[in-house]
Amino acid sequence: MHKAYCVQSILTQGVQIEAIAAYGNHVILGTRSGQLIMYSVDKDKGVDMQMFNKNFSKKPITQMEVVAAENLLFVLTDSMIHVCDMSRLENNFEFVHSSPDTKGCTLFTMDVDSRKSTTGELATFIRIGCAIKRRIVFFFWKVDKLASLELTIELLDLPRAICWVNQTVCVGYKDEYVIYNISCTPPKMHKLILTSSTISQEPNICLIRSNMLGISKDNYLMLIDPSQYQAKEGSVEGSMNNKTTAIMWTHPLLGLVWDEPFVIARTKNAVEIRNLVGKETLVQSLPELKNTRFLVRSDKGTIFAAASSELWCIRMVDIPKQRKELLQQKKFQLAIELTDISEEKGNDKAQTIREIHRLYANELFTNKEFSEAMEEFEKAAIDPYEVIKLFPNLVPEPQHTVDDAVPTPRVPKLEDHDLENAYKALIVFLVQARQREVVKLLDNKNSYKLLLEIIDTTLLKCYLQINDVYVAPLLRLNQCHFEESEKMLKRYNKLSELIILYDGKGKHKKALTLLKEQANVEGSVLQGLNRTISYLQALGADNLPLIFEFADWVLTEDPHEGLKIFTDELIDVEELPRAKVLDFLVSKHKALVVPYLEHIIDEWKDTNTLRHNALLKEYIKQVQQLLAQQAKGEETPELPALRAKLFKMLEDSQHYSPDSVLQDFPTKVLLEERALILGRLKMHDKVLAIYVLVLGDMSKAKAYAEANYDQNKDVFDILLEIILKPMQQPFEDVPMHPDYVTPNLKVAVELLNTYTVKIDPIKTLESLPDDMDSSEVKYYLETVIRTQMAEQHERQIMIGLLRAEAARLKTAVDKEMNKSFILNESTVCPECKKRFANQTAFVRYPNGQMVHLSCYDRSIASNQP
């Protein structure tokens, strides 16, 4: 215990006290004979009577409440509430108002709230609840009288104690406490607890911390949060199942008052003072005040106590003096609460509170209460490095930071379970500290970066020892000290996490070397190629030489999987410079050139001409090799599929260069494929010669001619000439098709009959053999003649129509030219309302209106969207 309050005796005998109220240094007594007396109590000047009203009432004064902001005193006497004005001492409690509506009142409670009114002035709102028989009737103070709030609570029994807080009213009956939510209509009742389980005890209620209720039950003070009972209609109601704090006292409580941070209560043997925090709540006992009947708080640190005819003032001891004593007793929480309400300067107060938190944290840590200690370190805003130094094995090397001159507190030896608990608490503290430091990093100051590095490195060491599942996420944040972290990860054989560290710090060569070393180690977490492939894929174009260096062994080990380094569907992979990748594969892994080119062209839709040419040349090269093997009698099952790929690309691709591909194309084989290239070059005669004279495939020749007819009207003439006048050996050492070694008149006649309108008759007649029977081309000639006659007839009709249209237009023009109009100096433009001057350009509308040319232009411009 320590001395928190000192007692000053004011009156020892005289009046019979029945009620007491106080504010500031003033105390008001209500007597049994109906008198009102106010004393002013000063520590230095002593006691002075300020007001005395001898005949205020003929009945005892049973309850009083002061509203100091309005200089009003509410007095309950003769079962009615009266209001007095205390603004002038000489008026001795000038009577203001008596409320007949409160007749029958046995006790009352008040709610006083100061806030800005609609006019912007600070106004005090006073509400009062009066217990009248088995009801509580509510009023409010309106200028000079009590007016009804139109609100009533029907009670279960006669109330013995009531207290109003926010939108709830707590009522103490003889045997139980209930709470009413007055925000509902009608008010909702919630039962709390019995007043006592063993003895007959009067209920006691007081307001704690302005928003909590303190109620007595036997030897306990129960703290209840009334907000949990303020559920609106239709929402979940609160109940006593919620957490409720109970503080034990030596005897049943007879009266309560709150003076932050203490609860002062009357018991049968003394007035006890307790705080609400810590294990030992008893602060001070005042046995000399055991006979008190009344306790009332006047102001911060000032309480008045009264017996039947005695009066005392209980004043709080100076806070600095209390704090010194509390720190010696290691009662840090109470010291913090007292400092928080002290009148010390803001900065000094905050610094003092932080220092107490630090001392408290060190004490908790020494007592192995690690979680609580870290919470206090957090409140003290202590440098995280100072906390880390409490764990000598965790201090990073080198030690970068902060004040090593600060003495390290006595640290308990931590082992086994204690060490694990300490690490867990430290982790929580450092995670919170890290969040703050990350925000400070926006200032880009090295000191913050160094501290963050120490925090992360320490977290890494803690995780490695108690919960390594968090190691990888921490390393991805990339703030750990590299050498220290590398050493710790190697010690714990955390190879996978070591790769993350290397990656985050940009040590890619170290990571890839480790992956290569572990790839073939049986049982290693890095065994296989997948981690290496994934790592290389993520490096990006900036690390291309490193990718090529370590991709080499992967491609050698498993070409199919290794090629994913350059072909996987990832943004970083797709953005690699394809020309350099192709050069690398050509020089080191030629077998993968075709799969790579196929992927970037087919999947990524690459349109680069050089790469399209390269793939075609690779196809041609491989097909020629297979054809050579086939000529030797070897089996080549892959030839049809490969040749199909070549043909499809030559046919579909629009991005290769035909001239370039043709240079290396064979002339004795792959003639059908050659025809596709020649077709791109519009060499129709050579293409048709291949289809007809070499392949003997007239259907392909016809299809080619049809496809190219719109661009070249002579293509069918060329085809006919090739059939009728076959050239000898169009390709060296390539045999001609036997059907077309000599002119094939049958095919020629069929072509003439099928494509009559697309073949020039003049050229055709010149190409046909002289000895050819005219009957063979009868159908062709008849069709040509009919077509020519039809075209001639159509032309004549068109000529006649055009002449008629020309005559119509000439007549219309002559009609328009015969129109006349007069434009003189008195003619006005309807747009600008101005006259036409000599030689002014103008426009005449079909309706006869005339406007200036400039006005016409503006009108057209304004109407355009």
Image (cartoon, rainbow, N blue to C red):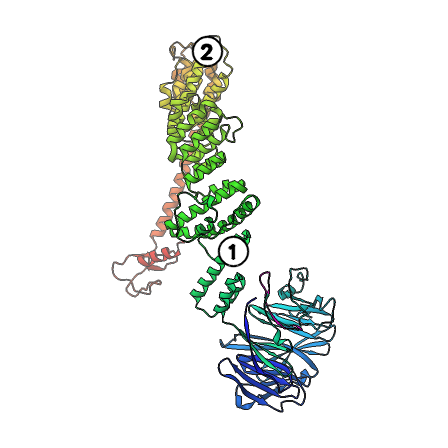
Question: Can you name the residue that lies furthest to the top here?
Answer: 632
Give the secondary structure at mark 2: helix
Task: Provide the residue designation for mark 1.
Answer: 363
Q: Is 272 in the magenta? A: yes
Query: Percent position (x, y) of residue 816?
Result: 36, 52
Q: Earlier in the sequence, mark 2 or mark 1?
A: 1
Q: Is residue 701 visible?
A: yes
Amino acid at dot 1: Glu
Nearer to us in this view, 666 or 846:
666
Q: Residue at x 53, y 46 (%)?
A: 414
Nearer to us in this view, 809 or 129:
129
Do callouts 2 and 1 mark residues in contact (Cβ within 8 Å)? no
Q: Is 291 in the magenta? A: no
Left or right side of 794 for 137: right
Give the secondary structure at mark 1: helix
Amino acid at dot 2: Gln
Badge 1 density bin: few <14, some 14–19, many ≥20, Cα 10 Å? some
Q: What is the span of residues highlighted in magenta in the rendered image?
A: 267-281
Q: Residue at x 36, y 45 (%)?
A: 810
Query: Percent position (x, y) of residue 491?
Result: 48, 35
In the image, residue 610 sits, relative to residue 86, either above or below, namely: above
Task: Provide the residue designation for mark 2.
Answer: 629
- Image quadrant for the C terminus? bottom left
- Image quadrant for the N terminus? bottom right
Question: Can you name the residue that lies furthest to the left here?
Answer: 838
Query: Percent position (x, y) of residue 567?
Result: 46, 30
